[in-house]
Amino acid sequence: MGNIADVTWLLPSALEQLLQQEEAAPAGYDLVIFDRWRPPRLPAANTLFLGVAPPGDTWQTGPPALAPTILDVDRVHPLTQLVDMSYVKIAEARPLAPPPGSHALFDSVVGTLLAVAPRDGFEDVVLGFPLAVDEQGQSVPNTTWPLRPSFPVFMFNVIRYLGGSRGALGGASAAPGQPHTLNLPVEVREIVVIDPRGGEHRLTREDARPFVFSDTHSTGVYEVRSGGDRDLLERLVVNLFDRQESDLRRRPSLDIGHETVAGRTDLRATRGELWKWLVLGATLLLIFEWYVFNRRVFF
């Protein structure tokens, strides 16, 4: 399996210099992960904060809570698909108070512990507990989540959803009416989106913020082309398909929050339909009468 992302590890001091030089933009980085460190300002990119809230007053955190239990996981959102938080232990966490328009992904007995919120064409994801804490100069684990199989699944979802790891002309998928963010190179200032009916939608930008296309009311394939030479940059597919809603297979168990409910087989009396048998009997009787009538006439 090939690499799905180019990763750069930076200390807070080096990352702060990049933010001052305006280099943390989509042309340089699609996703910036902050581990227990709050930058002076947010970069022009998607972010993931581990154990700390973003700068400013839009995100708020509550008092520390010891050993919180995660009760519910949003299994529909792309960030938490196939993420199972059962048997994950957390030593300490701070419940989140995200800004309006956010979406809670982890709900616990003390409040929201993972949420995602939009920000000027980008998205910020905040985890309410750190993976490790510093005690006496050493890093001590704060949770058993990195030891569970769901942690690499979550990180893969983060890179795929926030890191823009699609192929060059890969077709992203969106639901009708759902806005779609186009993370294109910073040198692209103008694009033309051609909808399935042939209509053209021209979008422009003046800074490094991504394009946001919201006129996705028709199902089909949308083509994203540059505004000048009309080179094909990306394709967007708008459809009604939902993998989870379309999966009607019978499962032996059902996961509800942190509990697993086992399935069982039960026999119950139901009202049967007899009209089909009556119609079949009448049809056979008519065939028999027709046979007897023809036998009497010709023989």
Image (cartoon, helix red, strand yellow):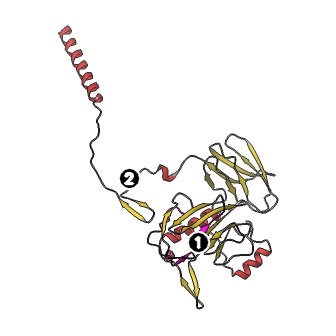
Q: CA distance from mark 2 to mark 1?
A: 35 Å
- Magenta segment includes 62: no
Query: Residue 191 at what x, y percent from top left?
Result: 77, 52
Q: Nearer the viewer, mark 2 or mark 1?
A: 1
- Magenta segment includes 93: yes
| Towards the viewer: 194 or 265 | 265
Q: Tell me what residue is drawn at x 66 percent, y 56 percent.
A: 169
Write the start and end of the magenta stretch as one range.
78-100
**In the image, is 238 to the left or to the right of 202?**
left
* Mark drawn on residue 250: 2
Residue type at the position of mark 2:
Arg
Q: Main secondary structure of the magenta part?
A: loop
- Residue furthest out toward the top: 297
Per the image, the residue denoted by label 1 is 128
Q: Tell me what residue is drawn at x 37 percent, y 60 percent.
A: 261
Q: Secondary structure at mark 1?
A: loop
Q: Pointer 1: residues within 10 angstroms few (<14), some, or many (20+)?
A: many
First reached walking from the N terminus: tag 2 or tag 1:
1
Q: Tell me what residue is drawn at x 56 percent, y 59 percent.
A: 77
Query: Residue 34 at what x, y percent from top left?
Result: 65, 75
Q: Is residue 149 visible?
A: yes
Total marks shown come to 2
Q: Pointer 2: residues within 10 angstroms few (<14), some, or many (20+)?
A: few
Q: Is residue 122 above or below residue 35?
A: above
**In the image, is 145 to the left or to the right of 171?**
left
| Towards the viewer: 159 or 101 | 101
Q: Tell me what residue is drawn at x 57 percent, y 62 percent.
A: 104
